[in-house]
Image (tube, rainbow, N blue to C red):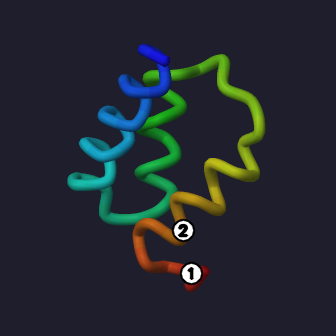
Amino acid sequence: MVHTKEYIKNYEEALRTAKTSEELVQSIKAKYPDLTFETGLQLGAKVNTGEMKW
């Protein structure tokens, strides 16, 4: 559960400064290089940056 809380905190921080979904993805991948399911990360980044509607 600690990992999840940390991930959400870091994601929200990255989202505040990212101008595009690609910047957001790169920021998260830099902090968590071993993450899997990149498709989910990319989709979530597009939705959260407003590039795509959910």
Numbered label attached to residue 52: 1
Mark 2–mark 1 CB contact (< 8 Å) = yes
Numbered label attached to residue 42: none
Q: Residues within 10 Å of mark 1 (few under 14, many from 20)?
A: few
Q: Is residue 50 left or right of residue 36?
A: left
Which quadrant of the figure contains the C terminus? bottom right
Q: Is residue 40 left or right of residue 32?
A: right
Up-down relation of residue 7 to residue 40 (above or below): above
Up-down relation of residue 1 to residue 46 (above or below): above
Name the one closer to the observer, 2 or 27.
2
In percent of width and height, residue 33 lies at 59, 20
**Element at label 1:** loop
In percent of width and height, residue 43 lies at 65, 62
Identify the residue at horizontal 53%, vertical 22% (top origin). 32
Numbered label attached to residue 46: 2
How far apart are the alpha carbons under marks 2 and 1?
5 Å
Q: Is residue 29 left or right of residue 10?
A: right
Identify the residue at horizontal 22%, vertical 53% (top origin). 17
The amino acid sitting under disc 2 is Lys
